[in-house]
Amino acid sequence: MKTKLFCLFVLAILVVAFSSFRTLNNDTVKPFVVVLDAGHGGKDPGNRGNGFFEKDIVLDVTLQVGKILEQHKDIKVVYTRTTDVFIDLYRRGPIANEVDADIFVSIHCNSHHTQAYGAETFVMGVDKSGKNMETAKKENEVIFLEDNYEEKYAGFDPNSPESLIGLTLMQEEYLDQSIMLASLIQGNLVNNLKRKDRSVKSGPFWVLHSSYMPSVLVELGFLTNKEEGPYVNSKKGRAEMAREIANGILTYKKNISLATESSQNPTITEEEIVKAIETTEEKIYKDIEFRVQLAASSKKIDTKPQNFKGLKDVDRKKEDGLFKYYYGATSDYNEIQLLKTYAQEKGYTSCYIVAFKKGEKLKLSEVLKSEDK
């Protein structure tokens, strides 16, 4: 165990050292530009679950997210709106393009005729199951409030699956990074605020389709739910959700920076990782297989090493309409941590550990708490 901790400590020091060196010697780097989009506004109140106003809630949360991010000198925040005004849907994405944004985050609240509840985060994509089509329709239907919408949207019909599916092409290039950003935000909302996990999903949202950078849409929760609605509307709830969204964005920024640095400055070799594994104390979890998830994509990629920065024995599985790529397979938690570190050094800085039991994915936190090892 001491050997493992020492290895991880040394790796951490090296990463920090490289990061500090590059920061000191690169004062002219373009700021990390975040565009925050508070959904709805003005004559469009959004959903009115429990008598609340979605437009007011999301504006407050958005401004709080921005305030947190603006404390970092290397981050520039741009808002699509800062007051209760109506912004045409077709203008929101291009605002991000005009300022050469690094990410685009649109914030909304959900509604349903049942007592559905929970947080969910969307990336742009085709929802072949149809389960997410209703959410996309509701968010897209705001175009009917716009003047001359027939001309602006060239015949687009929010109620037509064909129109919705046609939106997905532009964001395909940024899907992997969008999923990373969405996963970080969703994970924070679920794990730190103990919210029901409605997961990261794909859906055809107009507000996401025309932005030329990683883009996500966050549904804070269901205003129509008798318990979740008051929480989302509360001062405490808004502040907590804003904090977790901002922290997700900050982690994404850090991961992207480290990915660039790691690819240019590799600090450990495969031989060193193998030696560390051989000398590390085992921590076995019975009937559990740990793996490192490298990426998720709509693209089916050959798992040969040259496609994964030289990593060997990468495995591909199709889950929830996406191809997910895994590295390593072991019941030894200490070993998988070292493999994760190696994958991060190779450039997969957003990779994370997942746990399986008889092929079924489990929550890692629950596995680690288990006494059945």
Image: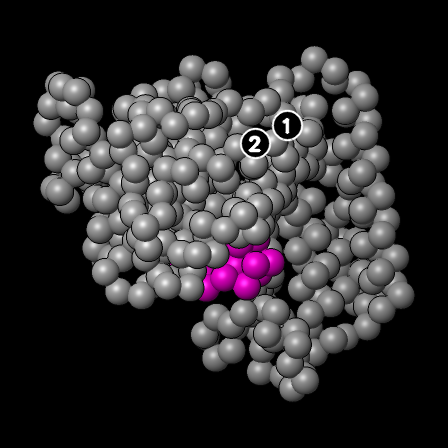
**Residue with the most extreme bottom position:** 372
**In front of the other: 362 or 5:** 362
**In front of the other: 187 or 166:** 187
Q: Are the residues at dot 2 and dot 1 in contact (C-beta closer than 8 Å)?
A: yes
Picture coordinates of residue 21 (x, y %)?
Answer: 82, 27
Considering the image in quadrants, where does the N terminus appear? Answer: bottom right
Q: Is residue 152 left or right of residue 314?
A: left
Provide the residue span drawn in magenta.
188-200
Image: 39 above or below 241? above
Examine the rendering and report whether any part of residue 169 can be seen: no
Which residue shows up at 86% across the image and 49% down it? Answer: 10
Magenta run includes residue 74: no
Name the residue type under label 1.
Glu
**Displayed quadrant of residue 205:** top left
Examine the rendering and report whether any part of residue 226 can be seen: yes
Picture coordinates of residue 362 (x, y %)?
Answer: 51, 72
Mark linked to residue 66: 2
Image: 308 above or below 214? below
Q: Is residue 95 left or right of residue 281?
A: left
Picture coordinates of residue 149 (x, y %)?
Answer: 15, 23
**In front of the other: 373 or 220:** 220
Q: What is the crowding at mark 1: few (fewer than 14 residues within 10 Å), some, or many (at least 20)?
A: some
**Displayed quadrant of residue 65:** top right
In terms of secondary structure, where does tag 2 sit?
helix
Which residue shows up at 40% across the image and 19% down it? Answer: 95
Mark-to-mark CA distance, 2 and 1: 6 Å
Name the residue type under label 2.
Gly
Considering the image in quadrants, where does the C terminus appear? Answer: bottom right
Which residue shows up at 12% across the image and 42% down it? Answer: 160
Magenta run includes residue 195: yes
Q: Which residue is mark 1?
A: 70
Picture coordinates of residue 132 (x, y %)?
Answer: 27, 53
